[in-house]
Amino acid sequence: MRGVWQELAGLVLPVDCAGCGRPRTELCGACRRALWRGGPLLLVPVPSARKAVAGRGHDPVRRIALAASAELRRVGVGARVLAVLRQRRAMIDQSGLDARQRLANVAGALEVPGAAGRLLAGVPVVLVDDLVTTGATLAEAARAVRAVGGRVTGAAVVAAPRSSFLFNGK
């Protein structure tokens, strides 16, 4: 039955490879091999603001990471979620900020506390977020993971505005 629902959903939201865009596959063989060379793959969600989590009653980015991990395991990639990033301090809402302001807003705001860093040692880490605009939050998350010896190999996001793909006005 899952296949029928996937085909129907594909009419509305076409399924393409998350890595290269190849049609009709969630993750093609070439991208699977590039992403995963055996051993564990850790998906580390970027933490949502505490106030937002309290208001929603859940952390959407963590739920996205859990769903992605389940799908990766379904296609043979040994993935699991490790929610080790924490906010060291509050950040202001970034919706009205430009790229420089976003970088300043998130600088030093995330950390991997205590012994959690040992869980990241020597394991490929893919950061997970819901939206990327300038990349400031993902850059801060990568900094925090690397600060404890983690190895960030990529990032996965659900959405990005068209402006995220413009460089030098092109």
Image: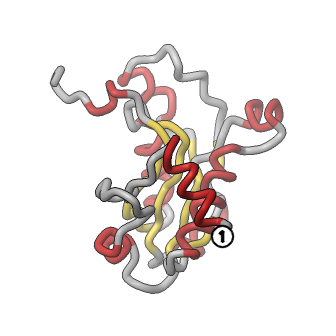
Q: Which residue is mark 1?
A: 115
Q: Is residue 47 left or right of residue 59?
A: left
Residue at 24% in and 28% down: 166
Q: Is residue 44 above or below residue 77?
A: above
Residue at 40% in and 56% down: 18
For label 1, the crowd category at 10 Å Cα-Cα, with few meaning under 14, some 14 to 19 and many 20 or more, is: few
Location of residue 147 in the rendering, given as x and y in whole percent from the top left corner:
46, 59
Location of residue 139 in the rendering, given as x and y in whole percent from the top left corner:
41, 44
The quarter of the image holding the C terminus is top left
Location of residue 71 in the rendering, given as x and y in whole percent from the top left corner:
57, 67
Q: Observer-nearest residue: 39 or 117?
A: 39
The quarter of the image holding the N terminus is bottom right
Q: Is residue 45 above or below residue 105?
A: below
Q: Is residue 11 left or right of residue 36?
A: right
Res 103 quadrant in image: top left
Q: Is residue 70 left or right of residue 77?
A: right
Q: Observer-nearest residue: 66 or 44?
A: 66
Q: Observer-nearest residue: 47 or 148?
A: 47
Q: Is residue 11 visible?
A: yes
Q: Observer-nearest residue: 131 or 14?
A: 14
Location of residue 125 in the rendering, given as x and y in whole percent from the top left corner:
47, 66
